[in-house]
Structure formats: C-alpha cells, structure tokens
C-alpha cells in the first residue's frame, strides 16, 4: 500500500491523514450547485437542504434545473468553512464572528458589558490593542480530531460541548479560581480529574467533531487500514462512472467504524454490522483491495472466489462468492475448481448457476461434519452408505418441514432455512454437478474419493411447480380501470408502475425485460407499432414484437414524462445517443444520469402490495406470461408462433407455459405438425417446417407408385432397381443419404421416434458444439419428416398414418403403406416454398 500511495500517478490529495476534499471535486464534491451558496449538499442531493426544498417545489411547478439555478439566491454558510486563527492569538483557533478565540471572546463580552453599565461606547479596535496573546494549547486531545484546542483542558470547542453533553466522563475540569491572566503570566494551569483513565478512554473513543465540510479524518486508525482507505478512495474515484457517488460523511462513518471495531485492515471489517449507508463504500473498497491483495489462485486457500478475477460481472450481484461454509478442504477445493472451470469456459448468465452448487456443498459439508467418520475431512473414508444417508436425511427434512443443517435464510439472519422439496432438488442437483465432474477430471482418484459415493447422489427428480394462468375473475380484477388506478396511486414518485404492469399483461414479456426498458423502445415499421426489448435470459437482444396502438400511445406518454424529467435535471432534451441508454422507467435513487432503471424487486414488492389491497389471493406478475401463452393457443396460434412471440429457446419451454388439457386436439395437432431447432442448434428456434398443409396437387406430384418393384429398407423403401434385383448396393447401403430412398406413410411413427431419439441425444450432449453438430446432421431428415406429414395431410391420410404403430401384413394393402414419396423431394419442398415466398413464384 505504501508503494501504491507513493507512486507518481497517485493523487496527492489522498496522501494526508486529514483529507480536505475541495467542494468542486468531480467525485467527492460537496458544494451546493447554486452559484455562490456557502452551504454543503445534503447526502445524495445536488443542493443544500434549503435549496433542495426550493428545487422540489420548483420542479413540481414544471420548471427545469437551469432556470432554477439562475433564479435561486445563494445562502450564507452556517459556520466558518475553514479554521482560522484568532486575530490576537496565532496558535489558538477563532470561534466567533469577531475572529477571536474563546478566551478573548469571553474577555470581550465582559469588557462590553462593563462599558454599557458605565454608559460608555465600546470601540473594538481600542480594546484589541490592549490585549496580549495567550500561549497555544496544542492539538485537541481527542485522537481523531485535527483541530487546535482553545482552553487549558486541551479540547477543541466542539469537543468541549460534546464532552459536557455526554456527562463529563472522568470528571476532567480546570482548577477553581483559575483565570486566563495566569496563562499570560506563565503560570501552569493543572487539569483536575475524578478518573483520568476514563477521560483518556473518552478521548480515544470519541469520534471527530463535524467542523469542516469535505474534511475526512483518518487519525487514530491503524496504519494499514488508514492506507487502504486512502488508496481505495483514489481508486474508486477513477471508476466514478461505474459506482454510486459517496458523500464524504459516509467515508468518515466508515473510518469511525474501523476505529470502533479496531481492525487492522478493511478486509477484517464486519460489514453486516455497519450502518446501511456505509455498506456500499465498504463493499466496494474491500472488492478493490482483494483484487490487489489476493490473486485468483490465492482465493482457493482463502475460501472464496471473485468473479472479477475472470472479468465476469453478473448484473445486480456482487462478485464475491464465499465458500467458508464448506469446512472440508477437499470438498471446498472441488467446489472452487468447478466454479473456476465454469467462469473460465462458459460464464453463467445468472448467479444461481454458481450459488446452487455452493449451497449444496455447504449442506453436504454440514452433514458430513456431523455424521461421517472424522467429520468427513478424509474423503477416502467415505463410502456409498454415507451418501445414501445424506440423501435420506434431506428427504426426511423436506417431508417433515425440518430446518437445514447449513443453508440459512439470509446472509444476516442466522436462522437455518426450512427444507422443502424444491430445496432438496437444488441440493442434489448442485452436489451432483460438483461431484460428477471429479470423475471426468480424475480428481476423485487423486484424492481417494470413491466412485460409489459420487454416484449415490441421485438426479433431481422433483421439479418446481409451474405457475397457473390467472383465473377469469382475477384477470378481470387485475385489468379493471378502478383497480389500475389504485395501483397507480402506489407509485408516489410516478416511476411508471402501472405502465410496467400494462406492458406485461399485453406483451407477456418477463418483468425484468420491461422494467429495464430503454427510452427508445418503440417505433413504427411500415406504419405498424413495434415494441423493442432485450431478451437477456435467452441471449436475444433488440427483439421486436407488434403491440396494440393504444399501448404504443401509452408508452409514448411515459417517454414524454421521462424526457421531461431529464430536461428538468439537465436543462436540455437528451441527445440521440443519450436516448439509446436512458431508462424508460428511471430509478429515483443515485441516478444522476438517468441510466439506472427501477429494479425488478421494486416492481414485485409494489405489485404484492396491490394484490393485498385487492384481496384476491396470492398471485405474481409472471403469471401474466402463462395467461397470454394459454390464450394464444386457445385463439388458434400453434406452438411455433407462441414460442417465437414469448422468446423461448425451445418448444419444450413453450409447453411449460401453455396450460391446456392434453386431450385438446389443437395441442395434439401443434405437437405433431411442428418441429423447430432445439436449444443446442446453431440457430436456436429456427423453424424447420410450417404448419400450412400441402395441397392435394402438390402431394400427388411428389407421390411415387410403389406398384413397381421395390425392397424394404430401414424406415422406408429402396427403389434402385439393381438393388431390388438382388445386386449389391454401390453406396454401401447408406439409405438415408440416397436419392433412391423413399418414405411411406407407414414409416411416419418410425421417423417420429427417430426424431425424438436425436432430440434426446442433442439434449444430453456434453457441450454446445456437439449439440449443434447433432442438430445439423439430423436437419435434412427433419425436413423430410415434415414434408411427409404435409404430403399425407394433403391426401387426407395423416390421421391414418399416425394410427400405424408397426408394420403389419394387413396394413400393406392400405394406401398409407403403398403410397411413398422420395425423401429428397420431400425435404426440398420447404426450400422451394421459402424461395417462392422471398422472391415471388
């Protein structure tokens, strides 16, 4: 730290133990923004308390900030912004408006009183020339105070007042009968104590007195933590565009907390015990320090992992992942290695990918500590029975609602969480991910962990329950105009609470996608209203869907409100570049540039309050998405259209959102007639077919008369006459890639099963490239299957073909058996249709 602070690039402002921040500092500035105002800003405000009240009233009247700054009158400072010496005693600070120290101010008051009683005028200049300076008393005895004392008690004036308010600990006092004249004559004035040690403790523990705006006192801190605060202030000021603004008093409170906890380093600070306002600077400072103190490899021994070491930042989450709850070193190392591999090769989108294995290992560690031989610290002593006992214990706790062994409700609440079936599923899934990876890497053999222990952790079989659509009466209540007005009343700052909800119920977006909208989120394409948003959960950015005209107009009104708020704060409209990054629903706190959106949790909490007011039961905003998906299907949309509209990556996810009986023929038709690329494909969600049936003329044109000779092949028939006559196949019987191979209606169920088999293979692929390869290999076959379905549908034979489960002799005489189509022609049919649609027939 000494080398970093002594570097030429380090700002000299932060090198002193008492840091006096200029009022116009770009990051820690404290001047009121009204020109000439002598007062300091209120915390997280641009103006002092007096001007802030005036600005709020001005803004309610529709005025902007430029006009307010021009009209506002500066206010005088309530106290001297700097400490100046007494005009008579250069070694004692002045305390009053006359520029005199406390002792001379008392003498002046007595002199003026005597002159008034005698009926004489009091000329200050004539009195000053008669006075002699008092000797200085040195710095205030309070360890944190840099100000000079003004009495023989050796306390500054503000600490004298504080000492008296706090009951005079130790009973320090000046002797009875002492006078300031004794000091001028050189006589010693001895301080008397009832308990000198108590007085010294008070001087050591007392906080610095608030005297100067922008002054930060690091006196009394241990050397290392003092240097850390200096360097962290400088470092964070360089990153001011990425973090919140911190008032200097917050950092002073942080320094006081370090004094009270008597820490050697900021890394030793107990952050949860700090005041709410000083936790952000404490966390950011410790984050910056960890990156220079501890390397990525050192974090393994330290018992945590920092995503910042991998250049990974997960939105809305800190970078620190604590693993100290895993007491077995071998298990903690396995967890660290697994997260390290994931952050290196495939950083996750959300934090749960990393926290679920962590919580699972904490729970497993707590069980082994209590029930395994030697607390489970020797992996070679663990057998299958220990894993089976762990599984049984978890299921028992979920069945009877017992508390967990290691997982707690929150970071600050020590009470263990209640185990649920969903938590058990997450525990098994997370532990299995970490432990099974040891078999692939060979770590299990190196540490002596038995394979039977690893394999005994089961697959997660309990899935979380899915949300239902809104019942009709609930949907009506949530869309009622009077109820919507009650929701709008909860939005006291007009941040767009009702607008977010109306966008959700109309578009079916995820709530995070709506609350995080940018200002330019709507446009017209060929006079059609379009809604632009980011589907970050599935990696699709800048996606557009059509919306109703009335919703388009409502978003326009919200844009006008947000733009007017920007004009009020900046005195000008936003530029085109600023509109692209401004939030449509800006957050109220710590958002000077308007880029931070309201949080999804803010909307969720407000929505929950609204639901409680309506007294209609327990519902969540995400159910609007399920309701929309189900209504789309009932209105005649097929799964591929619903999948595209909702922004899903697979048809399987769309089925999770569509709530309708399996016996509904529309759902059966959609599932049997549509196939799209799965999640592992090179282009997830690409449509390999459409739901439009083939015409009868098109089907008859592709049909092949199998009354001529043919021979059966796997999944179809071979029509190459030399092979039919008994000769060897010149292509080594590669039937599925041969243009002589044909598919009949009797083979439809076979190819359906083949398609499911390839889907399962792709889903179980170890990585993305392998899954992409499997999808690409099967894509021509998938096109042929869809072409076969369309051809059979055009001839009215699709239902008959779906009823054929096996090739039976009696089926041979049916048309579904005897009528076949060339596989390549079927696959080519969709390509020709796409070309006609794009370039015209």
Image: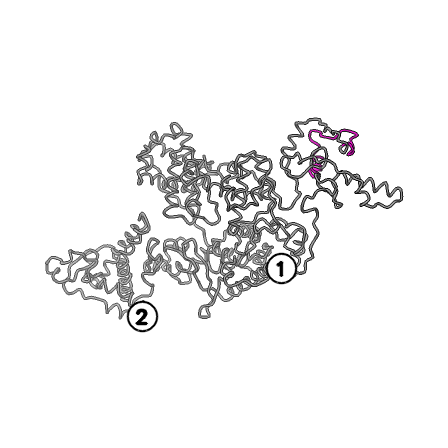
Q: Where 628 falls versus 549 (above or below)?
A: above
Location of mark 1 (residue): 65
Residue at 43%, 56% in the rendered image: 535
Label 1: which secondary element = helix
Q: Which of the pair 356/618 is nearer the observer?
A: 356
| Left or right: residue 476 compared with residue 637 | right
Q: Earlier in the sequence, mark 2 or mark 1?
A: 1
List the single residue furthest toward the right: 119
Residue that protrudes farthest toward the bottom in the picture: 841
Q: Nearer the viewer, mark 2 or mark 1?
A: 1
Q: Is residue 441 left or right of residue 99?
A: left
> For the residue labelled by badge 2, is the local secondary structure a helix, a strand or a loop?
helix
Q: State whether residue 811 appears in this view.
A: no
Q: Residues within 10 Å of mark 1 (few under 14, many from 20)?
A: many
Q: Which residues are magenta?
A: 156-182
Q: Quadrant of residue 802?
A: bottom left
Mark 2 is surrounded, within 10 Å at the Cα level, by few (under 14), some (14 to 19) or many (20 or more) other residues, namely few
Confirm whether the magenta stretch covers residue 167: yes
Which residue sits at x=52%, y=54%?
Answer: 596
Could you say where residue 509 lies in the image, as x and y percent from the top left? 46, 57
Percent position (x, y) of residue 283?
52, 43
Q: Is residue 669 left or right of residue 65?
A: left
Do residues under tags 2 and 1 come within 8 Å of each other at their CB atoms? no
Taking the magenta stretch, the answer to whether it contains residue 351 is: no
Q: Is residue 471 above or below residue 548?
A: above
Q: Quadrant of the C terminus?
A: bottom left
Residue 396, position in %: x, y? 42, 36
Query: Where is residue 476 shown, x and y percent of the image?
Result: 52, 58
**Image-based side of 595 in relation to 670, left or right:** right
Residue 743, visible in the rendered structure = yes
Residue that numbered label 2 is attached to:
836
Inter-mark Cα distance, 2 to 1 = 58 Å
């Amino acid at each position: 730290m000494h080398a970093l602070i002594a570097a030429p690039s380090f700002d000299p402002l932060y090198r002193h133990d008492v840091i006096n921040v200029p009022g116009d500092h770009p990051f820690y500035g404290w001047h009121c923004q009204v020109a000439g105002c002598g007062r300091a800003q209120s915390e997280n405000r641009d103006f002092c308390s007096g001007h802030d009240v005036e600005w709020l009233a001005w803004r309610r009247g529709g005025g902007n900030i430029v006009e307010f700054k021009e009209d506002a009158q500066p206010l005088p400072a309530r106290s001297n912004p700097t400490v100046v010496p007494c005009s008579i005693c250069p070694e004692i600070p002045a305390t009053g408006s006359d520029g005199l120290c406390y002792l001379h101010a008392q003498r002046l008051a007595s002199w003026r009183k005597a002159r008034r009683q005698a009926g004489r005028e009091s000329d200050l200049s004539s009195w000053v020339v008669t006075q002699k300076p008092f000797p200085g008393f040195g710095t205030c005895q309070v360890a944190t105070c840099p100000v000079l004392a003004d009495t023989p008690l050796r306390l500054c004036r503000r600490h004298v007042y504080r000492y008296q308010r706090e009951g005079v600990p130790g009973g320090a006092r000046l002797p009875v009968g002492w006078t300031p004249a004794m000091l001028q004559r050189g006589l010693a004035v001895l301080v008397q104590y009832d308990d000198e040690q108590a007085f010294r403790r008070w001087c050591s523990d007392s906080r610095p007195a608030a005297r100067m705006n922008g002054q930060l006192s690091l006196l009394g801190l241990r050397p290392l933590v003092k240097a850390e605060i200096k360097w962290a202030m400088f470092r964070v000021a360089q990153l001011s565009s990425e973090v919140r603004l911190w008032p200097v008093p917050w950092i002073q409170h942080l320094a006081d907390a370090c004094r009270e906890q008597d820490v050697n380093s900021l890394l030793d600070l107990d952050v949860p015990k700090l005041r709410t306002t000083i936790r952000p600077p404490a966390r950011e400072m410790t984050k910056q320090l960890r990156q220079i103190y501890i390397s990525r490899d050192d974090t393994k021994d330290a018992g945590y992992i920092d995503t910042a070491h991998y250049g990974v930042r997960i939105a809305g989450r800190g970078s620190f992942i604590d693993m100290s709850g895993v007491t077995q070193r071998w298990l903690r190392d396995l967890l660290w290695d697994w997260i390290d591999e994931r952050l290196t090769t495939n950083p996750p989108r959300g934090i749960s990918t990393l926290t679920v294995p962590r919580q699972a290992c904490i729970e497993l560690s707590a069980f082994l500590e209590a029930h395994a031989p030697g607390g489970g610290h020797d992996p070679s002593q663990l057998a299958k029975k220990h894993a089976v006992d762990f599984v049984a214990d978890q299921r028992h706790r979920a069945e009877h609602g017992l508390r967990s062994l290691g997982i707690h409700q929150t970071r600050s609440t020590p009470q263990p969480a209640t185990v649920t079936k969903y938590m058990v599923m997450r525990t098994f899934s997370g532990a299995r991910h970490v432990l099974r990876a040891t078999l692939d890497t060979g770590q299990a053999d190196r540490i002596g962990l038995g394979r039977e222990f690893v394999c005994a952790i089961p697959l997660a079989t309990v899935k979380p329950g899915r949300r239902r659509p809104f019942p009709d009466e609930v949907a009506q209540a949530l869309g009622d105009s009077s109820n919507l007005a009650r929701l709008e009343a909860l939005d006291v700052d007009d941040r767009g609470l009702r607008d977010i909800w109306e966008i959700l119920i109309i578009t079916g977006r995820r709530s995070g996608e709506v609350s995080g909208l940018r200002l330019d989120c709507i446009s017209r394409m060929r006079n059609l209203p379009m809604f632009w948003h980011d589907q970050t959960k599935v990696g699709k950015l800048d996606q557009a869907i059509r919306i109703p005209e009335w919703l388009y107009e409502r978003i326009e009104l919200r844009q006008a409100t947000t733009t007017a708020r920007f004009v009020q704060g900046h005195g000008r409209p936003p530029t085109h570049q600023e509109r692209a990054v401004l939030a449509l629903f800006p957050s109220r706190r710590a958002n000077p540039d308007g880029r931070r959106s309201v949080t999804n949790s803010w909307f969720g909490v407000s929505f929950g309050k609204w639901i409680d007011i309506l007294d209609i039961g327990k519902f969540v905003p995400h159910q609007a998405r399920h309701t929309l998906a189900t209504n789309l299907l009932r209105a005649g949309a097929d799964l591929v259209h619903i999948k595209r509209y909702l922004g899903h990556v697979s048809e399987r996810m769309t089925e999770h959102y569509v709530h309708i009986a399996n016996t509904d023929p529309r759902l059966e038709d959609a599932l049997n007639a549509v196939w799209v690329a799965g999640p592992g494909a090179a282009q997830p969600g690409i449509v390999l077919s459409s739901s439009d049936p083939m015409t009868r003329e098109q089907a008859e044109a592709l049909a092949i008369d199998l009354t001529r000779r043919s021979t059966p092949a796997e999944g179809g028939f071979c029509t190459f006459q030399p092979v039919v006559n008994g000769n060897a196949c010149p292509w080594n019987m590669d039937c599925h890639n041969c243009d002589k191979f044909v598919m009949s209606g009797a083979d439809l169920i076979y190819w359906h099963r083949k398609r499911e088999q390839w889907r399962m293979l792709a889903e179980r692929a170890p990585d993305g490239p392998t899954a992409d390869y499997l999808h690409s290999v099967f894509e021509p076959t998938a096109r042929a299957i869809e072409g076969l379905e369309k051809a059979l549908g055009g001839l009215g034979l699709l239902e008959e073909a779906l009823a054929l489960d096996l090739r039976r002799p009696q089926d041979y005489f049916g048309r579904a058996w005897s009528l076949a189509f060339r596989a390549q022609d079927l696959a080519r049919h969709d390509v020709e249709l796409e070309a006609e649609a794009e370039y015209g027939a």
